[in-house]
Image (cartoon, rainbow, N blue to C red):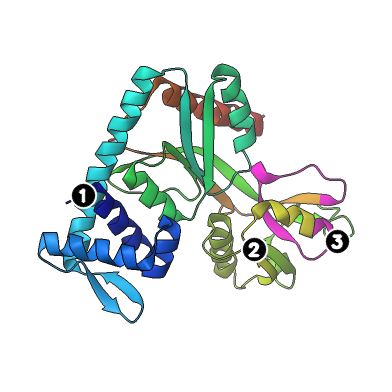
């Protein structure tokens, strides 16, 4: 059994499609298929059920997946540990986020303390985030909502109120707060289903008897403020993503349910360098300070 076979197997298991997996691995479909076939021959069992063009893990595959993830995780940890021993003041911090609104301030502070540490940041879905944590491919994730799993450490670091952003000329612009029922007939701009803030606020709105009417759904949260300013619609915006713009007003929502939890995640078995531990400390201190500002 070869390391390359394990890496190819994990990618096919993730994408469930040979074409997509081959594209992500930058190899030909033929090469990928032959590698998976050799792995199955080595193991003596099929790992996937073929359903049309899709590949779906069978019971053998699901059991082997956990072992393969663990094996590659340990190899990545060993590689990282040796790198830190040889160059303790250099290296790359691997990060994943579901929203990047607070990350620039955190990284700016971290760079002052660790100027030679590089960053690699990915904006991911929850499913992608979990997979990278399991592989040992990221040091930390900043996630909303939190992820509850036995192998993942989840530290809630901030409770982030959701606000309603409206353009200056809107009928509610002179208000400081609003009830959700007053938004029943509004047009909304938002991110797609699957993003934490969208899923949270859709559920909260349903609890008071309506579904928000979206005229725009995208995958770039930072664009929503621009769309509100252009009067395309109003938006639910986390307080940490608030921008002080001349043509937008932000209203508090009159319900305690309109709050998202931000969590710092890491794999419980992961090796952490001193530089990575410093990053965790800075993140926690940053949100502790933000919590104190909110209370004051």
Which of the two discs, 3 and 1, sits closer to the camera? Answer: 1
Quadrant of residue 212 within the rendered picture: bottom right
Question: Does residue 135 lie above or below 53 as drawn?
Answer: above
Query: Does residue 142 appear in this view?
Result: yes
Residue at the spot x=61%, y=54% of the render? 255
Which of the two discs, 1 and 2, sits closer to the camera? Answer: 1
Residue at the spot x=30%, y=80% of the render? 51
Q: Dot 2 corresponds to which residue?
A: 218
- Residue numbers of the magenta segment: 228-248
Report, in whole angstroms, how far the alpha carbon at label 3 lies from the one at label 1.
62 Å
Q: Residue furthest bottom?
A: 52
Q: Dot 3 corresponds to which residue?
A: 170
Q: Earlier in the sequence, mark 3 or mark 1?
A: 1
- As drawn, is 94 to the left or to the right of 51? right
Q: Earlier in the sequence, mark 1 or mark 2?
A: 1
Quadrant of residue 286 within the rendered picture: top right
- As drawn, is 50 to the left or to the right of 262? left
Question: What crowding class fits label 3: few (fewer than 14 Cα within 10 Å), some (14-19), or many (20 or more)?
Answer: some
Report, in whole angstroms, how far the alpha carbon at label 1 lies from the one at label 2.
41 Å
x, y (%) of residue 188? 71, 66
Could you tell me which secondary element the residue under label 1 belongs to? loop
Numbered label attached to residue 2: 1
Report, in whole angstroms, how far the alpha carbon at label 2 lies from the one at label 3.
22 Å
């Amino acid at each position: 059994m070869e390391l390359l076979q394990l890496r190819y197997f994990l990618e096919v298991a993730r994408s469930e499609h040979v074409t997509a997996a081959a594209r992500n691995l930058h190899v030909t479909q033929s090469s990928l298929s032959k590698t998976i076939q050799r792995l199955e021959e080595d193991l003596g069992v099929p790992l996937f059920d073929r359903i049309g063009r899709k590949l779906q893990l069978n019971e053998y595959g699901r059991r082997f997946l956990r072992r393969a993830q663990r094996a590659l995780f340990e190899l990545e940890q060993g590689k990282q540990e040796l790198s830190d021993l040889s160059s303790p003041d250099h290296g790359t911090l691997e990060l994943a986020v579901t929203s990047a609104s607070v990350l620039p301030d955190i990284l700016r502070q971290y760079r002052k303390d660790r100027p030679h540490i590089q960053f690699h940041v990915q904006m991911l879905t929850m499913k992608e985030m979990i997979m990278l944590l399991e592989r040992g491919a990221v040091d930390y994730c900043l996630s909303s909502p939190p992820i509850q799993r036995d192998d993942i450490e989840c530290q809630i670091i901030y409770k982030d109120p959701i606000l309603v952003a409206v353009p200056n000329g809107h009928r509610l612009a002179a208000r400081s707060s609003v009830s959700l029922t007053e938004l029943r007939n509004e047009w909304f701009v938002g991110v797609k289903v699957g993003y934490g803030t969208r899923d949270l606020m859709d559920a909260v709105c349903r609890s008071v008897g309506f579904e928000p009417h979206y005229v725009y759904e995208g995958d770039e949260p930072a664009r929503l403020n621009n769309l509100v300013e252009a009067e395309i619609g109003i938006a639910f915006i986390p307080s940490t993503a608030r921008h002080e713009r001349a043509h937008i007003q932000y209203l508090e929502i009159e319900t305690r349910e309109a709050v998202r939890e931000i969590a710092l995640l890491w794999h419980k078995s992961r090796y952490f360098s001193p530089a990575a531990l410093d990053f965790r400390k800075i993140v926690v201190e940053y949100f502790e300070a933000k919590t104190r500002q909110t209370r004051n």
